[in-house]
Image (cartoon, helix red, strand yellow):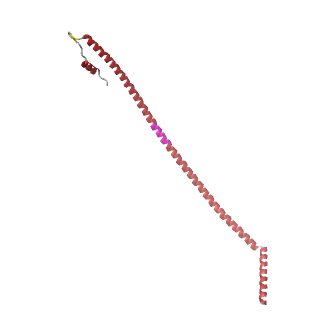
Amino acid sequence: MLLSIREVFDLAQKDVDFPIKFRGYDPEAVDDYLEDLDRSQARLEKQLASMQEEVTKLREENKILSHRISIHEKANEEIARLALKEASDLIEKAKRNANLILKESLDYVRTLSGEVEGFKEQAATFRASVQKMSQDLLDTIDNSEVYYLINEGSKSNDHASLMVDNDDMLKK
């Protein structure tokens, strides 16, 4: 705790006990005491000036540190803002890519569905074509002379066998 010069002087007066001489105090003792007070005052003033310089330096440092803290806070806020913006941009980009992939997938499924329907139609057409060709072949065979002759031959054999069977029955 620093004392003012007045307080130091007041304290010094209380503790001082000058020897008394014939017409007052001893002048040498008073002069020595005043010199001691001057030295104490000079020392205290020097100490005060040093402390004032220290306070000034500390205030400057405090100002610089406050400014640095402010700059760091602003930088951190800017970094956070940029990080949020970048994250938001990445999310939007991911959504767009996901929507694009989904659209392409749906288009591909539609294409495949169309191809499957086309294959079904081709299969039905092919089946109908095979059936028609088979029927045409059967009709051709049925209308051919060879088939007619074969059928006639088997009818005659059937007819002949029926006649033989009838003859056998008559004999009995």
Q: What count of labels does the image hold?
A: 0
- Identified at 46% across, 39% down, the residue is 80
- Identified at 46% across, 37% down, the residue is 78
For the N terminus, give its image quadrant: top left
Q: Nearer the viewer, residue 88 or 161?
A: 161
- Residue that protrudes farthest toward the left in the picture: 23
| Helix, strand or loop for the magenta stretch, by majority | helix
Q: Is residue 42 magenta?
A: no
Q: Nearer the viewer, residue 69 or 1?
A: 1
- Identified at 58% across, 54% down, the residue is 107
Residue 131, percent from left and from top: 69, 68
Quarter of the view holding residue 20: top left
Residue 153, percent from left and from top: 79, 78
State left or right for residue 50 relative to residue 156. Answer: left
State left or right for residue 172 relative to residue 8. Answer: right
Q: Is residue 85 magenta?
A: yes
Q: Nearer the viewer, residue 7 or 28?
A: 28
Residue 113, percent from left and from top: 60, 58
- Identified at 79% across, 85% down, the residue is 164
Quarter of the view holding residue 26: top left
For the C terminus, give its image quadrant: bottom right
- Residue that protrudes farthest toward the top in the picture: 22
Figure check: 37 above or below 67: above
Q: Which residues are magenta?
A: 76-86
Figure check: 125 above or below 52: below
Figure check: 11 above or below 129: above
